[in-house]
Image (cartoon, helix red, strand yellow):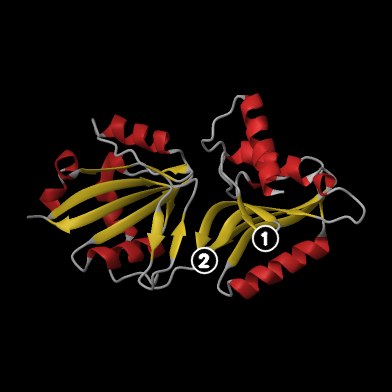
Amino acid sequence: MHARVVVLCLLIICAEGRTGSAQKLLTPETFQEFLYPGAKPEPAAIKALDQKILTTFPDARPVKLTSLLTPTAWQKVVAYYTIMTGLPFRQIGPRFYFIFSSRNGIPTDYIEVCPIQILRGSSDFWPARINLVLLSFPLAGLTPASQPTTSELKPLTGRLWYPGQTRNDLAALKNHELGAGAQVLIILTEDSFDKVYSFFRRNYGRIYIVNAHREHFSERDFEFDASSALSTRRHGKELHIRVEENPLLVDREGNSERLLGKCLVQYTFWPAQ
């Protein structure tokens, strides 16, 4: 059965002229786009899936999840998601997974295709159940540290303040990483990395981008010393600005969360040397 799927997927991908690179990420914003055409949600299965996840990951917060039924042959469904995601599937027993992230080897953000056995019917034409799951895990140790407020530090960033959501909890996490000498402000935005880069390129000047690609997503970043441009040293501070695409957050307990589809803008103030 597995071999037939491999052959079928390769034939369809070649026929479409697609490559094996990622085509689309599963995020809260794109979740609806991953619903299989014509598939119908099954409330009882959704409830059972939710309970299964909470049993496996008691601290998880389901962001989005659904369970769908389709009469379409499971092989065609697997091929459909192979092309759409650009990911190789992983077979676990009779189930086929397209995994975007995992925790301790267990999928957390994924698409699962389950062939539904029909008696007296060829396995080639069994219909499928499709489970789509997006989970979030709380990060420990996010109590805001004792430091100057945003209203005190923001004016020092001048024209380099990027509009977005101020996250004091994430600032506290970064403060813990950097030590007591640092004062951190964090902006989280769903703007594209290219848009954020253009903002700083326009308001600061030439900036070097570190290009990186991990699994199925881009992980670019850049960092620069804005102290001279903003004259923050006159206030006894140096300012370093760092931007990360699809940032990975890790807390002091070792829990991690990948913020796909987002950019993190970090303003770090240090005592002037």
Q: Callout 2: few (<14), some (14-19), or many (20+) C-alpha neighbours within 10 Å?
A: some
First in sequence: mark 1 or mark 2? 1
For this view, does 271 lie left or right of residue 104?
Answer: left
Q: Secondary structure at mark 1?
A: loop
x and y, in percent, of residue 248 in the image: 40, 55
x and y, in percent, of residue 166 in the image: 41, 55
Whether residue 105 is situated above or below residue 79 in the rendered picture: below
x and y, in percent, of residue 47 in the image: 76, 67
Q: Secondary structure at mark 2?
A: loop
Residue 115 vs residue 25, the one in the foreground:
115
x and y, in percent, of residue 122 in the image: 86, 48
Residue 241 vs residue 88, the one in the foreground:
88
Q: Please indicate, yes or no, whether residue 258 appears anywhere in the rendered image.
A: yes
Spatial separation of the CA atoms under disc 1 and disc 2: 27 Å
Q: Amino acid at mark 2?
A: Phe
Mark sitting on residue 229 = none
For this view, does 267 lie left or right of residue 38?
Answer: left
Q: Which residue in the protein does label 1 denote?
A: 93
Q: Which residue in the protein does label 2 denote?
A: 137
On-image quarter of the C terminus: bottom left
**Residue name at image x 25 percent, y 34 percent:** 207
For this view, does 22 lie left or right of residue 254?
Answer: right
Q: Please indicate, yes or no, whether residue 33 appears anywhere in the rendered image.
A: no
For this view, does 210 lie left or right of residue 58?
Answer: left
- Residue 34, by quadrant, is top right
Q: Amino acid at mark 1?
A: Gly
Q: Are marks 1 and 2 in contact (CB under 8 Å)?
A: no
**Residue name at image x 81 percent, y 61 percent:** 43
- Residue 145, by quadrant, is bottom left
